[in-house]
Amino acid sequence: STQRYMGTDSALKMFGVFVVIVFVVGPIALVEKMLRNLPDWHSKHVDHDSFAPFKRIDAGKWSRPRLYLGAVLLLPFRLVVILCVLIGYVALSSVVLFGYDRQSMAPLRPCQLRILKYSAKAASRLLLFCFGFVWINKRRVGGNLDALPPSTAPIIVSNHISWLDILYMIHAYYASFVAKGSVRNIPFIGTIAVAFQSVFVNRLSNSDRKSAADVVRQRQLDIWNRQNYPQLVIFAEGTTTNGLYLLPFKRGPFMAGLPVLPVVLKYPFSSFNVALESIPFEVSLVLTLCQFYNNLETTELPVYVPSDEEKSNWSLYAENVRKYMAAAGGLKLSECSYEDKLKYFETIKRHLQIDRT
């Protein structure tokens, strides 16, 4: 009896150690690993102001104790829920899409679309909740009486701040996206992309990029002609910023000369900014999950209908929409590009070692 008691006591101790390692030491070590190799955004060796849209604006506001506490109390449980939601949606999508030709990407039947639409909106909202977005502050700016309803615009044009933008667009609009052709064949992810009726393109060469532009334009026309496709979201800047700026727009959303629905996103913060401008995705993911609460504010503007001049000049159309969104969202216009962002990354990496020596 004594040996049995000692054996049980030993097993309980081992279980306690296991729990401490998995739910305390493990999450804290993961957070510390994410933070350890991040650059110093106050480095005197880098001219951060020249790359203002990509500069971290939360540097110095992070609290390690607060991140550690969130890692212990939130991170493991949120990860489990997120995994369950994703597996459940992939399973449902696989059943609904059974027999569907993924290569043709023909419009789904109305019953298929309804099931996938409402399940995706519910799943994406639950995921946003897991990432700390308990409430979302949505604002809709009214247009004049003859303004088109938001659902009639084939394209949703939005600024791009974080990977979380995608979850919001799915929740709010059940929107489709432009994705690489190879994504279609990736297990799980490919099923989700097909369920959203994504536009799959290849961009390896100039001819591929021209073909991709034609595919995107055709999808816009299909949506405008009331074929059974969801609205298409295009982040017209082509990359992410810190949320304070609006970069020049690419031609994708504007080359068809059709109306667009402008949406401005903002993520107010007091500690960690969820913007994915100059930190790796895995760091952003882990630190976002460690936040007790995150904020999201969205502004939906009236549908922008291009003039005849704008229809024949996509750059004029794009610039007018950009100024319209910047004014409505209180954003600063910047002429920086994706190439400037890459240059900023290289500058940070080059001087990271200097700062540590």
Image: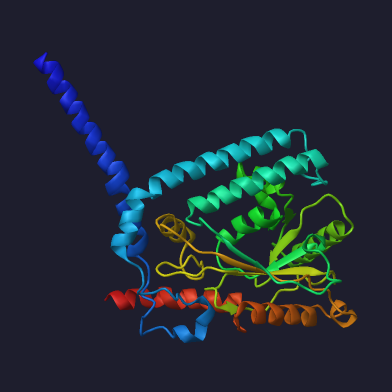
Residue at figure coordinates x 16%, y 27% from the top left? 10
Compared to residue 7, the image places residue 88 above or below, namely: below
Residue 114 drawn above or below residue 70: above
Residue reaching furthest to the left = 2
Q: Residue furthest top?
A: 1
Q: Position of residue 50 (x, y in %)?
A: 50, 86
Residue 91 vertical position relative to residue 40 in the rendered view, above or below: above
Residue 25 drawn above or below residue 258: above
- Across and down, in percent, residue 86 comes to 56, 42
Is 120 or 213 nearer to us in this picture?
120
Residue 170: percent from left, percent from top: 65, 54
Q: Which of the two residues, 48 or 183, is positioned nearer the viewer here?
A: 48
Which quarter of the picture shows residue 298?
bottom right
Question: Which residue is pictured at 39% across the width and 49% down the height?
Answer: 75
Residue found at the very far front of the displayed protein:
145
Q: Give me the residue at 80% from left, 43% from top.
A: 108
From the viewer's perspective, tell me whether residue 335 is left or right of residue 207.
Answer: left
Which quarter of the figure has residue 140?
Answer: bottom right
Left or right of 113: which side holds 344?
A: left
Residue 76 coordinates in the image, percent (x, y): 39, 45
Q: Is residue 293 visible?
A: yes
Q: Quadrant of residue 23?
A: top left
Quadrant of the image containing the C terminus: bottom left
- Tell me the quadrant of the picture where the N terminus can be found: top left
Describe residue 74's horizontal placement relative to residue 7 as left or right: right
Q: Is residue 102 visible?
A: no
